[in-house]
Amino acid sequence: DTEVTQTPKHLVMGMTNKKSLKCEQHMGHRAMYWYKQKAKKPPELMFVYSYEKLSINESVPSRFSPECPNSSLLNLHLHALQPEDSALYLCASSHLGQGGTEAFFGQGTRLTVV
Amino acid sequence: KQEVTQIPAALSVPEGENLVLNCSFTDSAIYNLQWFRQDPGKGLTSLLLIQSSQREQTSGRLNASLDKSSGRSTLYIAASQPGDSATYLCAAFLTGNQFYFGTGTSLTVIP
């Protein structure tokens, strides 16, 4: 199983709402990632978790709050978002370590903030 | 911070043509480089992974090469087909488990 599953596929939320994005993998990967992708742009790294601990935060606003409750799950909690946060949010996972660490991506959550 | 650039930004070719996509990175201390394909509005599909100790990898009509010393990778697509139309992204894997993506090449193969 080389699948990374993201839910929901689509999400529309108001600026005062609280919602969560979910990502799941069962490949035994201990590194998990959140990326944000705007239209016609490459994915931008947001967060990296290594062994369920946050290892990289690319200066992401606090209205995005990641959580890694166990080695298979990664959540992204959203609160008080702005319309400019509308984007495709991609989750990925990989083994830890140097070299040979192929990354696998989910199909993404298309988020629209109204 | 690693800068990853892809040239050309867009490419349109007739079916059957062989083509080369280019990826350049500023920091040669990468662990590996991965090529992805992305269809409009979709996630990323992994095409090829080249480890830092390797110089090339092949999968079907695809061949990717890596030259760390010059900070370059190329993706060669043989006998292009309309189904190859997509955006192609390279990503450099750095220490600390960071993947940084290139700017992407949008490919259109005309039947």
Image (cartoon, grey):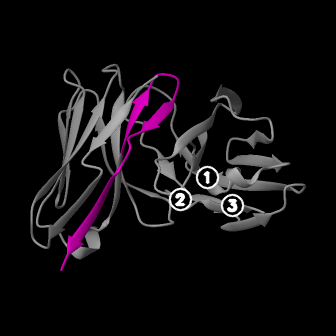
User: Under tag 2, what secondary structure?
Assistant: loop
Residue at 52%, 57% (x, y): give it.
A39
State whether residue A52 is above or below residue A24. Answer: above
Q: Which residues are magenta?
A: B90-111
State whether residue B57 is above or below residue A1. Answer: above
B95 inside magenta stretch: yes
- CB contact under 8 Å: marks 3 and 1: no
The residue at which mark 3 appears reads as A111
Question: Mark 3, mark 2: which one is toward the viewer?
Answer: 3
Image coordinates of residue B34 in percent, x first then y, are: 35, 42
Gap in Å between the C-alphas at discs 3 and 1? 21 Å
The residue at which mark 2 appears reads as A3
**Considering only order in the chain, which callout, 2 or 3, is on the residue closer to the N terminus?**
2
Residue at 71%, 63% (x, y): give it.
A112
B51 inside magenta stretch: no
Could one spot residue A30 in this view of the protein? Answer: no
Q: Amino acid at mark 1?
A: Gln
Residue at 67%, 28% (x, y): give it.
A59
Q: Amino acid at mark 3?
A: Leu
**Chain label for disc 3:** A
Secondary structure mainly formed by the magenta segment: strand
